[in-house]
Image (cartoon, grey):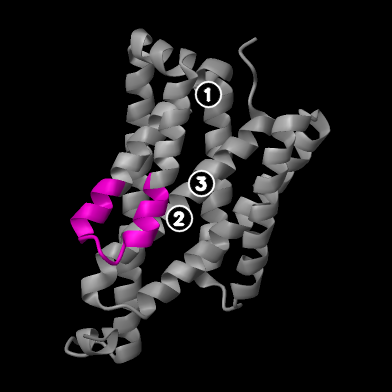
Amino acid sequence: MSIYNYNSNNQYSSNQSLDVFVSKVMRQVFTKMFLAMVITAISAYMVLSVPALAKFIFTNSWVYWGLLIGEIVMVIALSASINKLSNAGATALFYLYSVLNGMTLSCIVLVYTAASIALTFAITAGVFATMAIYGYVTKSDLTKFGSFMMMALFGLIICIVVNLFMHSSTLEWIISFAGVVIFIGLTAWDVQKIKRMAAMSDYNSAGKIATIGALSLYLDFINLFLYLLRFFGSSRD
């Protein structure tokens, strides 16, 4: 069933119907993303509320790295199998990922002050919202820009791996600045890409598009937050 046929029976014109449908899908995207953020926060709080659990995770490197590897595997599995999974299955996998992410991210509360974390979160939310709105309303094609940002992201990953051995504070700051720029750009591109995916989809695939779109924006937000935290975070020491 095409999106045109899906909407052609209501009171709107085809273009109006398309806009309504796309807006509905985008609301689902941001709703799922918001719920995932809430689940992440609750998961982090639960870990910190049980000192024995927090100690087990952060004093046993194999546990912490196991969680990180599990997150990577889940993201890859969800992205690769989105068309094979049911809408409910894809959504459940996304929320499970947000639980694991909350468990690993809970360590930032042990490193940074609560006030600086709250400030950084507010800054991240403002920047993210601005770029999301831009990505949604702009008439410019961000495809080439997005491709450049993806190449820059791969370069960033390589620099991170290299710095694991170099331990260069200068390179660390360069990586942090580049990370902020890259994920600001990816936010606008991802929103436009999701909007176009919604416009070319039909009613039956809307839920899956909302899930994979929410995952993309969730990753953009989290990474932007973590890189900004290196600039605005205040150490507890």
Q: Magenta region: which residues?
A: 74-93
When the figure is inspected, residue 121 is found, relative to residue 74, above or below; the finding is above
Name the disc covering residue 221, or none: 3
Which residue corresponds to mark 1? 108
Mark 2 is surrounded, within 10 Å at the Cα level, by few (under 14), some (14 to 19) or many (20 or more) other residues, namely: many
Residue 49, quarter of picture: top left
Residue type (three-letter) at the residue carrying disc 3: Phe
Q: Which sits earlier in the primary sequence, circle 3 or circle 1?
A: 1
Q: Position of residue 85 (x, y in %)?
A: 24, 60
Residue type (three-letter) at the residue carrying disc 2: Ser
Q: Residue furthest right?
A: 170
Q: Position of residue 98 (x, y in %)?
A: 36, 40
Q: How would you classify the magenta stretch by its main secondary structure?
A: helix
Q: Position of residue 21 (x, y in %)?
A: 29, 75
Q: Mark 3–mark 1 contact, CB under 8 Å?
A: no
When the figure is inspected, residue 74 is found, relative to residue 152, above or below; the finding is above
Name the disc covering residue 216, or none: 2
What residue is at 32 percent from the left and 60 percent from the top?
81
What residue is at 78 percent from the left and 31 percent from the top?
166
The residues tagged by marks 3 and 1 sit, at their Cα atoms, a distance apart of 16 Å
What residue is at 41 percent from the left and 35 percent from the top?
101
The residues tagged by marks 2 and 1 sit, at their Cα atoms, a distance apart of 22 Å
Q: Secondary structure at mark 2?
A: helix
Mark 2 vs mark 3, foreground winner is 2
Where's the C terminus, which quadrant? top right
When the figure is inspected, residue 208 is found, relative to residue 179, above or below; the finding is below
Q: Is residue 7 left or right of residue 49?
A: left
